[in-house]
Every structure is written in structure tokens, then in C-alpha cells.
Amino acid sequence: MGLDGLSFSIGSESGEAKIEDSYDVVILGAGPAGLTAAIYTSRAKLKTLVVEKEAVGGEAAATDLIENYPGFPEGVTGGDLAQKMEEQAKRFGAEIVFADVESVELQGNPKSLVINGKRVEAKAVIIATGTSPRELGVPGEKEFKGRGVSYCATCDAPIFAGKDVAVIGCGNSGLQEGLYILKFAKSATFVEFLPTIKAEKILQDRIKAQPNVTCLLNHEVVEIKGDVMVNAIVVRDRATGETKEIPVQGVFVYIGLLPNTELFKGKIELNKWGYITVDRKLQTSVPGVFAAGDVIDKDVRQVATAVGDGATAAVSAQSYIEELEAAEVQAEQA
């Protein structure tokens, strides 16, 4: 859901909205899916709370340039797009707070969540907690995280101006973020586990046009070395088994994503990879609980699809609440 190491407070002293006791809709996550859902629910006059743990915009906000989001022919930075979505959601009355969701009880009605120690009730919940970068799991990675190992080019690339770096992973994210890194770095060595590059052809062409790039296909990183900071990686050729050490001062990791669903294990149905299973209305296995964006079980994870998911989940949540309130009226009249 964002960038590690950031912490925020809630309440009137920080200038943010104070969390109230109950809402029509609580949205977990302020990435493109969550913010779009908030735009729709708040426009529908539903009292909406968006809870974000780290940074508005999620992974998209950490992307230097988004070129495939409709309406921006020259592209748009992830940060700018996230800011506009946030402003739009707030314009219609959505409240956005930075806080930890400590526990959830999703069965029955209302739903109950503990947010920074405060119990909050909601008629419907939309989960848009997104994903986090997958780690390599090799010696040296954790030791040098923040000391040469990074998962965010937008955050850290300028630090490596004039230095040699490694980019691990040659999917779309690896190549796109690698192009940004190359604006600063002296050189970049791309390491790809597979024997071929799976990224879009346009990104491959742009990387190949760079004079200071080396690509190691069918290789894997087996160790990250350093003293105070990173100074080398050790890679293994998967075909021959040969290992070699490559001097670098930075390592950027783009080898996939993990869904942020730990909080929901045993509460809703997840697939074997931990993604949330949903129906065509984006309802989870629990009535009144919806999910949207990268956290759900689907094939395409892009900002454009996250926005569509957020709209669908919001409309579905609105319909659920309307049916719930109609049933309550009928019960009172019976």
C-alpha cells in the first residue's frame, strides 16, 4: 500500500479528519482503486472513510511516468495522478486518514473494524489494500535495505547519480523503472531469471537504445554484498551454474508483488496466492464486503483496471446498502 517506514497520526491535531464511530462505507487503501471507490460512494452521498496505512496513491504514486492511462497523451507522473484523485474524492466529502487497521470483523451487519485502537462500524467495506514488492530472499537483502537496496526508483534513483546499479527483473516494472534510474545512474545491469524478456516491446526497444546497459538473462541474484553500503551482487547463470560478482552501488528489485491480505486470512476467501476472490460485482465471499484493484484475483493489474474495479465495487456497495436499508424499513413496518 505504499512506502515502508512512513508513519502518520490521525485526529484534529494533525489537521486530518477525526475518525467517527460509524460510516456507510469504509475503504481500506488509498491507491487508484480505493480513491476511485471513494469518489463514487461520496458522490452517492454515502458517508465514506478511506484508511491508508502509508502513502496516498499506493504503488502508482511511486511510478515516475504513467503513459498508458487514458486522458494523458504525454503521460502523467504517478504522484500527480494520485494527488488529483485524492482531491476529487475529498471534494465530494470522502474523509481520508492515515492509520493502521488492527482487526476486522466482517460477518453480519454492521461490519466492525479497529482503526488505531478505535472501534468503527460500517454498513459496507471495500478492500483496496493493493500489493507490496516481492523480496529476493537472498543474503544481504535485508541487511542493506535502505543502504543500497531499494524497491522504488522514484524514491531513490537520484541518490545513485553517477553510480553503477543493478535492476533485478525485466518485466514491465523493471524496464520502466530502469529507464528512470538511467536518468541518474552511470550504468545499469539488468538481471532476469527467465531466458527471455517479457516486458512490452516498446520498453524493450527503449532499454536497448541505452548505451550504458547490460542484460543478463537466465540469471539469478544469489547474494548482495557490502560493508556500510552495497558494493556488489553475486549472480548465477542458471544454464551453467557459474557465478560471478558484479560491482554495483545500488540494487533495485522488481520481481513481482505480494497481495496485502494478511489481515483478511480466515475472514474472507483468498486464492492460493493470497489474492481475494470476488464475483463479477466485486463482492467477496462475505456479503457487504467488496474488493478492488491489485489485491483481487485477476489477470491484469494496471492503474486503468484498478480505477474500473473501484467504480464497480463502489456501485455494488451502494446497491448493497440500499437493499440493506430497504430490508430494515420492511422489518420495522412488519
Image (cartoon, grey):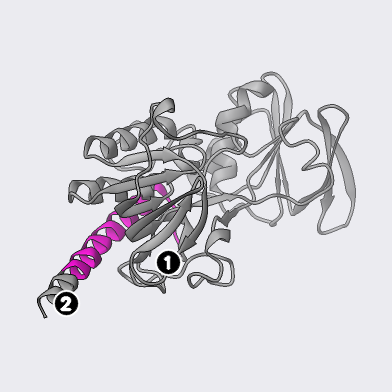
Which residue is situated farthest in the bottom direction here? Answer: 334
In magenta segment, residue 310? yes
Mark 2–mark 1 contact, CB under 8 Å?
A: no
The magenta segment: 298-325
Is 161 situated above or below 216?
A: above
Q: Which residue is mark 1?
A: 106
Count neighbours of disc 1 (C-alpha within 10 A) and say few if under 14, some if 14 to 19, many if 20 or more: many
Q: Amino acid at mark 1?
A: Leu
Q: Is residue 77 above or below residue 273?
A: above
Q: Quadrant of the C terminus?
A: bottom left
Residue 86: % across, % down: 33, 36
Q: Main secondary structure of the magenta part?
A: helix
Q: Amino acid at mark 2?
A: Ala
Rendered residue at 36%/57% (across/down): 121
**Image position, residue 162 (x, y; %):** 70, 18
Name the residue carrying label 2.
331
Q: Quadrant of residue 250?
A: top right
Q: Quadrant of residue 39?
A: top left
The alpha-carbon separation of the residues under discs 2 and 1 comes to: 22 Å
Q: Quadrant of residue 198?
A: bottom right
Residue nearest the observer in this picture, 64 or 46: 46
Q: Is residue 56 left or right of residue 40?
A: right
Asked if 200 appears above or below 229 in the picture, the reply is below
Is 334 placed left or right of 155 in the picture? left
Asked if residue 75 shows in the view, the reply is: no
